[in-house]
Image (tube, grey):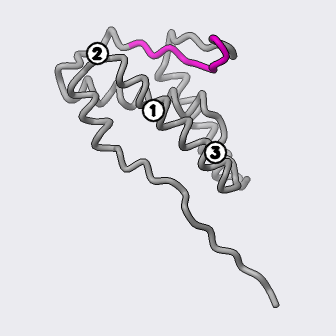
């Protein structure tokens, strides 16, 4: 992995930890890695509050899903982990604005092709 990508990942992980001040992390919660995202300080009836929580959820999903990986299979597994985690977290909040934000980011593009180069 190149230095910029590694540095970016470290910043994202650090940002997730900072954004989730007071969050609980465990390696195993009924077999699932998890982060608790607190949002009692946010007003989810406003767009800024819902957007802030959406970013917290995304940072937490990025943190618990780990490295994206290099192979197509690893990338697909990471994307499945990330999007499933975000979708489940959003569903548990029962906020129309948050749900709308998630659907707006719902392109959930999957890796479907690869280019292979070969010297002859």
Residue extending farthest to the bottom is 120
The spot of residue 117 in percent (x, y) is: 71, 79
Q: Whole-Å distance between the Cαs marked 1 and 2?
A: 16 Å
Q: Is residue 103 above or below residue 61?
A: below
| Relative to 105, 10 lies left or right | right
Q: Give the secondary structure at mark 2.
A: loop
Mark 2 crowd level (few <14, some 14–19, many ≥20, 10 Å Cα): some
| Relative to 37, 1 lies left or right | right
Image quarter of the C terminus: bottom right
Q: Give the secondary structure at mark 1.
A: helix
| Relative to 94, 86 lies left or right | right
Q: Whole-Å distance between the Cαs marked 3 and 1?
A: 14 Å
Q: Quadrant of residue 32?
A: top right
Q: Quadrant of residue 92?
A: top left
Residue extending farthest to the right is 120
Choose between 7 and 68: the one closer to the eye: 68
Q: Identify the residue shown where x is 31% and y is 11%.
A: 41
- The magenta segment is 30-38
Q: Give the secondary structure at mark 3.
A: loop
Q: Which mark is residue 68?
A: 3
Residue indicated by mark 1: 58
Mark 2 or mark 3: which is in front? 3
Q: Identify the residue shown where x is 62% and y is 68%.
A: 114
Q: Identify the residue shown where x is 27% and y is 30%.
A: 99
Q: Is residue 15 above or below residue 105?
A: above
Mark 3 crowd level (few <14, some 14–19, many ≥20, 10 Å Cα): some
Mark 1 crowd level (few <14, some 14–19, many ≥20, 10 Å Cα): some
The spot of residue 35 in percent (x, y) is: 55, 18
Mark 1 or mark 2: which is in front? 1
The spot of residue 112 in percent (x, y) is: 54, 61
The spot of residue 59 in percent (x, y) is: 49, 31
The first of marks 3 and 1 along the sequence is: 1
């Amino acid at each position: 992995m190149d230095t910029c990508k590694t540095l970016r990942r470290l910043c994202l992980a650090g940002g997730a930890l900072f954004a989730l001040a007071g969050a609980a992390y465990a390696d195993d919660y009924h077999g699932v890695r998890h982060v608790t995202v607190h949002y009692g300080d946010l007003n989810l009836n406003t767009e800024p509050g819902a957007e802030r929580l959406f970013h917290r959820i995304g940072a937490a999903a990025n943190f618990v899903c780990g490295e994206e990986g290099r192979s197509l299979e690893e990338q697909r597994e990471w994307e499945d982990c990330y999007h499933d985690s975000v979708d489940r977290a959003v569903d548990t909040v029962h906020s129309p604005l948050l749900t709308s934000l998630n659907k707006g980011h719902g392109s959930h593009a999957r890796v479907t092709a690869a280019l292979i180069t070969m010297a002859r």
